[in-house]
Image (cartoon, helix red, strand yellow):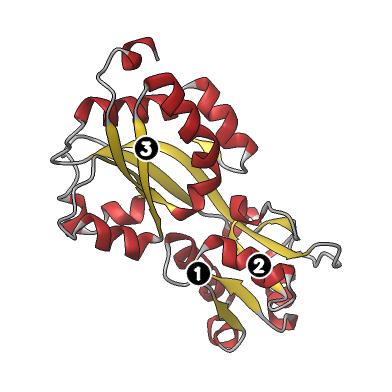
């Protein structure tokens, strides 16, 4: 970070996927100390990040689900250069802490677990939620799960709903489900496993281009990769 520290200190406005909040809770202050910059972060789900990126409000950098980049209007708000993948994570299943862990080891076992569950919590309008809905469809339980879905607005609310017993299962990005009050049963079976990738990119019109690039570079360091792993994601 020596070269970063030599940059003039800046207020760096970042758009970040909500599922990465715990990672930025640790890495954000580390980056600020190392660089002298101050992060101002907007956390959101994919639709909210697209809305914010295209709102006309200025920002410098994004670390967002790749689904954001699939929206043409949002992609246009980022520099045309290739994006840099920062972290990836698959869908997992969680239960209330101390509750019996259901069998999700095979597609059929997971299907039966879902059909037996009284309720499931996730965020339908998000990159992770898109993966969950695809999972339901692949298992042939899409219609059955509609009546059982307890839609949440943010990742912490999934954990809260399961921890309070308002939802029997939490089904979302696995790193979100590593939290007090819930037990992670595991990832969905390998045959059904797809990952949500969070990618970094500088804004098309950054006020702080150097600092934005420095943040992306920092998130690719070995130290940052170690933190990403401890938070339940995989680097890159």
| Picture residue at 37% right of the left edge, 46% below the top | 41
Instruction: Report whether 80 appears left or right of 124.
Output: left
N-term mark: 1 or 2: 1
User: x and y percent of residue 145 in the render?
Assistant: 59, 83
Q: Position of residue 66 (x, y in %)?
A: 35, 50
**Left or right: 203, with 153 as reference point:** left
11 relative position to 93: left or right: left
Q: Is residue 220 visible?
A: no
Which part of the image, by quadrant, shows the N terminus? Answer: top left
- Which residue is rendered at x = 34% and y = 39% of the image? 200
- If you read the primary sequence from the N terminus, does the residue marked by circle 3 or circle 1 appear first? 3
Q: Earlier in the sequence, mark 2 or mark 3?
A: 3
SS label for mark 3: strand
C-alpha separation, residue under disc 3 versus residue under disc 1: 26 Å
Which numbered mark, 3 or 1, is in the foreground of this view?
3
Q: Quadrant of residue 55?
A: bottom left
Check whether the beta carbons of the residues at disc 3 and disc 1 lie within 8 A of each other.
no
Q: Which residue is mark 3?
A: 39
Q: Which residue is mark 2?
A: 160
Residue at disc 2, secondary structure = helix
Reading the image, the residue beneath label 1 is 123
Crowding at mark 3 (Cα within 10 Å: few <14, some 14-19, many 20+) = some
Q: Nearer the viewer, mark 1 or mark 2?
A: 2
Q: Secondary structure at mark 1?
A: loop
Check disc 1: other Cα within 10 Å, few if <14, some if 14-19, many if 20+: many
- Could you give the CA–CA distance between mark 1 and mark 2, rounded to whole angstroms? 13 Å
């Amino acid at each position: 970070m020596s070269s970063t520290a030599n940059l003039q200190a800046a207020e760096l406005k970042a758009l970040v996927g909500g599922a990465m909040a715990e990672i930025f809770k640790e890495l954000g202050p580390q980056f600020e100390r190392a660089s002298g910059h101050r992060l101002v972060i907007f956390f959101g789900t994919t639709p909210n990040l697209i809305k914010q990126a295209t709102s006309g409000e200025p920002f410098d950098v994004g670390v967002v689900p790749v689904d954001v980049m699939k929206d043409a209007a949002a992609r246009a708000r980022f520099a045309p250069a290739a994006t840099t993948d920062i972290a990836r994570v698959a869908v997992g299943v969680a239960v209330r802490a101390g509750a019996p862990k259901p069998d999700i080891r095979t597609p059929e076992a997971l299907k039966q677990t879902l059909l037996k569950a009284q309720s499931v919590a996730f965020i339908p309008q998000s990159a992770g939620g898109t993966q969950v809905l695809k999972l339901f469809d692949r298992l042939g339980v899409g219609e059955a799960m509609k009546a059982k879905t307890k839609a949440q607005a943010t990742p912490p609310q999934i954990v809260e709903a399961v921890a309070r017993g308002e939802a029997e299962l939490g089904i979302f990005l696995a790193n979100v489900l590593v939290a007090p009050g819930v037990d992670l049963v595991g990832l969905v079976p390998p045959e059904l496993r797809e990952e949500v990738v969070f990618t970094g990119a500088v804004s098309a019109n950054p006020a702080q281009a150097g600092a934005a690039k420095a943040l992306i570079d920092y998130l690719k360091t070995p130290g940052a990769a170690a933190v990403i792993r401890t938070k339940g994601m995989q680097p890159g």
